[in-house]
């Protein structure tokens, strides 16, 4: 099919992200031929997870995660799509019309398109479905807020092979080295704490509680995401199919978001072909989305609950210093696919 990619920003674009990709995403990209040797060499390897909290710290082994700098990584993916024949239109806003047509706005120019298939991949705070109440969001009332920044490695004590997680009562802040001398910071914070103290004080509070240096926080350029955990009322209808964060979001504690977006997007071709033939895939696509994430959501929910419990972290820290059980569990929980 002829494919047009419409992005409302320029590429590379700013993206709040911790930059840690689960093995599942890397395996799928490699299977698609999107990661060659040169590309692979540019991705960092993360082989351990360091948990820091007021109740102690411990380092657990993980199956190798890769660290990616979203600025260069996303740009390479778009280049590969263009090489494969995709037409790319940046600085252009797309709005899906009630009749499944698409309005494209580039500056003051407005174009009405009637594609055979519309794939919406506009993330957690996209605007492409603004005219489609039938695709509305379901927001849990007390879902966490997201915050991210890119900071020089000189301002933080960070081992380049590790994902470091500072855990506190009001959320967690994660660190990963995404390029030499560059660290990505991603945080999931209690909405209530942010409303009460503001985002920076909340980040500082979590870091101080975990005994991680927080002096750099005020000097960093933070970007926020309103809500982290949301799902769509539906995932497909008529000629429209929704993928990635725009469909549903897995809390980023274990770095699942990119892998989910990649798995979802790379599975879409047979559904898109059927939509192009005029078939209805609403039920099947919803089953695919819910089914492929069900077990990961359970793991993520369990891990984030665990991470917010002082007693559990204290027990884990004590156990990790004496036995290999926590290490075996942490490796087993990493998201891998065949
Ligand atoms: C704090 C935080 C930390 C995270 N850390 C990690 C991590 O360590 N590992 C991990 O795997 N995931 C992480 N994630 C999640 C990850 O970033 C996302 O899951 C992933 O980027 C989803 O990709 P996507 O393509 O679905 O959406 P996005 O990457 O959000 O892309 C959506 C694109 O659509 C564009 N757009 C929006 N509206 C329109 C419109 N109307 N017209 C045209 N274009 C539009 C946007 O500009 C954007 O470029 C984190 C997220 C947060 C918030």
Image (tube, grey):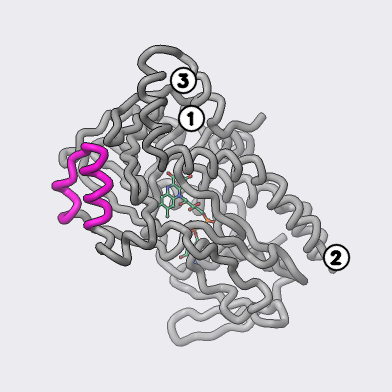
| Image quadrant where one finds the C terminus | top right
How many neighbours does mark 2 have within 10 angstroms: few (below 14), some (14-19), or many (20 or more)? few
Q: In this view, does 170 lie above or below 195?
A: above
170 displayed left or right of 130: left
Q: Give the range drawn in magenta.
A: 201-219
Q: Give me the residue at 53% from left, 31% from top.
A: 334
Q: Is residue 317 above or below residue 157?
A: above
Q: Give me the residue at 60% from left, 61% from top.
A: 231
Question: Disc 1 vs disc 3: which is toward the camera?
Answer: 3
How many neighbours does mark 3 have within 10 angstroms: few (below 14), some (14-19), or many (20 or more)? some
Give the CA separation, mark 2 to mark 3. 47 Å
Label 1: which secondary element: helix
**Residue that numbered label 2 is attached to:** 279
Residue 220 screen position, x and y as percent: 20, 54
Give the CA separation, mark 2 to mark 1. 40 Å
* Residue 205: in magenta span: yes
* Whether label 1 touches label 3, CB < 8 Å: no
Q: Residue 37 carries which label?
A: 1
| Image quadrant where one finds the N terminus | bottom right
- Work out whether mark 2 precedes mark 1 in sequence or the reverse, and give the earlier one: 1
Residue 247 screen position, x and y as percent: 61, 60
Q: Give me the residue at 30% from left, 35% from top.
A: 53
**Residue that numbered label 3 is attached to:** 327
Residue 132, quarter of the rendered image = bottom right
* Residue 314: in magenta span: no
Q: Which of 30 and 249 is in front in this view?
A: 249
- Work out whether mark 2 precedes mark 3 in sequence or the reverse, and give the earlier one: 2
Q: Is the magenta stretch mostly helix, strand or loop?
A: helix
Label 3: which secondary element: helix
Question: Disc 2 vs disc 1: which is toward the camera?
Answer: 2
């Amino acid at each position: 099919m002829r494919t047009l990619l419409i992005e409302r920003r320029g590429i590379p674009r700013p993206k709040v992200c911790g930059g840690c990709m689960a093995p599942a995403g890397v395996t799928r990209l490699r299977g698609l031929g999107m990661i060659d040797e040169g590309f692979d060499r540019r991705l960092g390897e993360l082989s351990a997870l360091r948990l820091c909290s007021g109740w102690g710290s411990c380092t657990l082994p993980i199956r190798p995660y890769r660290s990616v700098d979203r600025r260069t990584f996303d740009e390479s993916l778009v280049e590969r799509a263009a090489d494969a024949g995709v037409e790319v239109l940046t600085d252009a806003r797309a709005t899906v019309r009630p009749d499944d047509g698409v309005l494209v706005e580039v500056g003051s120019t407005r174009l009405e398109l009637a594609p055979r298939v519309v794939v919406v991949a506009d993330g957690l705070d996209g605007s492409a479905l603004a005219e489609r109440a039938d695709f509305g969001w379901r927001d849990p009332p007390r879902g966490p807020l997201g915050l991210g920044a890119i900071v020089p490695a000189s301002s933080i004590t960070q081992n380049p092979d590790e994902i470091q997680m500072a855990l506190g009562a009001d959320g967690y802040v994660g660190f990963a080295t995404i390029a030499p001398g560059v660290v990505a910071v991603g945080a999931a914070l209690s909405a209530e704490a942010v409303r009460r103290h503001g985002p920076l004080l909340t980040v500082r509070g979590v870091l101080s509680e975990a005994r991680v240096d927080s002096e750099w926080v005020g000097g960093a350029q933070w970007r926020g995401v309103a809500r982290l955990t949301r799902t769509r009322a539906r995932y497909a209808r008529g000629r429209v199919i929704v993928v990635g964060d725009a469909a549903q979001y897995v809390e980023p504690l274990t770095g699942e978001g990119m892998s989910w977006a990649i798995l979802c997007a790379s599975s879409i071709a047979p559904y898109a072909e059927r939509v192009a033939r005029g078939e209805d895939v609403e039920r099947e696509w919803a089953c695919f989305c819910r089914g492929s994430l069900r077990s990961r959501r359970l793991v993520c929910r369990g891990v984030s609950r665990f991470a917010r419990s002082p007693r559990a972290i204290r027990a884990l820290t004590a156990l990790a210093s004496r036995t290999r059980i926590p290490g075996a569990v942490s490796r087993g929980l990493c998201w891998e696919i065949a």
